[in-house]
């Protein structure tokens, strides 16, 4: 492997300091081979609407020592998870523009510097433990579930130095946002849903955040996700 890699890179220096064997990549539970015509390149995945970072996130779902079973359903799930993580990053980036009392009254717990420090240590410990990226990614999602806060961005910026998912790349996010554009025009919704949305807008304007959260949960139970932005509210279909 070292000789081949040096020849490919056309340099006398080593292209990597560490060399490890990984488990096989399987396709739909079976062997991958050219004779079975079930091999895929990144270009093949791109033709199906995926990219290299979607595949990279998919590989984080298992230890490098274990065989990894590739399916397009699993890749789609990874693509969606990566999109949601980027979405959280940019929503958290906008959080500093929100009024502080609105953030504090949010349903989810408020992130603190102490929690960020502890979770970063847990993340690094997972990576140091035989590159346990799967566990590390679980810790990332623990932090991502906190109320939108700029500290989430700072945390994700740190872990992304290792994960390399380009979470802060706005161009990538905007492109994926177009693909996942599930926004619903409020005027197209049933009248009873519009009435709840109207009441929630009024509650937010009057800073009645307890009622605002209650109405958001009611909308969620009816199959609608509410996304609060600086001066507006977006509605998406839940699933």
Image (cartoon, rainbow, N blue to C red):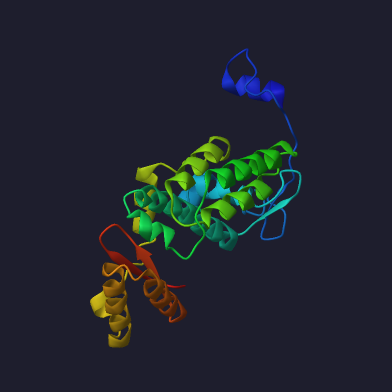
Q: Give coordinates of residue 72: x percent, y percent.
A: 57, 60
Say above or below: 197 vs 69.
Answer: below
Q: Where is residue 132, by image quadrant?
A: top right
Instruction: Identify the image quadrant of the N terminus.
Output: top right
- Name the residue located 75 percent from the left edge and 39 percent from the top edge: 129
Front residue (pair 15, 116): 116
Say above or below: 211 vs 146.
Answer: below
Q: Is residue 132 left or right of residue 203?
A: right
Q: Where is residue 74, by image quadrant?
A: bottom right
Q: Give coordinates of residue 203: x percent, y percent.
A: 30, 73
Q: In this rendering, does residue 145 appear at all?
A: yes
- Name the residue located 55 percent from the left edge and 52 percent from the top edge: 143
Front residue (pair 39, 165): 165
- Name the residue located 37 percent from the left edge and 58 percent from the top edge: 101
Q: Give coordinates of residue 137: x percent, y percent.
A: 61, 49
Q: In this rendering, does residue 33 appear at all?
A: no
């Amino acid at each position: 492997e070292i000789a081949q890699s040096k020849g490919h890179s056309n340099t006398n220096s080593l292209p990597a300091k560490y060399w490890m064997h990984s488990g096989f990549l399987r396709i739909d539970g079976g062997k991958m081979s050219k004779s079975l015509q079930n091999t895929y390149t990144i270009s093949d995945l791109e033709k199906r609407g995926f990219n290299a970072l979607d595949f990279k996130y998919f590989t984080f779902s298992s230890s490098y020592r274990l065989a990894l079973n590739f399916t397009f359903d699993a890749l789609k799930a990874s693509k969606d998870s990566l999109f949601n993580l980027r979405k959280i990053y940019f929503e958290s980036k906008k959080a500093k523009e929100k009024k502080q009392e609105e953030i504090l009254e949010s349903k989810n717990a408020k992130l603190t510097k102490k929690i960020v420090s502890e979770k970063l240590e847990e993340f690094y410990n997972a990576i140091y433990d035989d590159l346990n990226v799967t566990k590390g990614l679980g810790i990332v999602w623990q932090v991502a579930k906190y109320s939108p806060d700029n500290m989430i961005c700072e945390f994700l910026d740190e872990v992304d130095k290792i994960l390399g998912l380009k979470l802060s790349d706005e161009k990538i996010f905007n492109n994926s946002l177009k693909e996942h554009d599930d926004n619903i025009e409020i005027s197209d919704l049933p009248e009873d849903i519009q009435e709840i949305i109207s009441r929630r807008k009024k509650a937010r304007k009057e800073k009645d955040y307890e009622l605002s959260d209650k109405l958001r949960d009611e909308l969620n139970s009816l199959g609608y996700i509410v996304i609060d932005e600086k001066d507006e509210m977006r509605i998406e279909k839940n699933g």
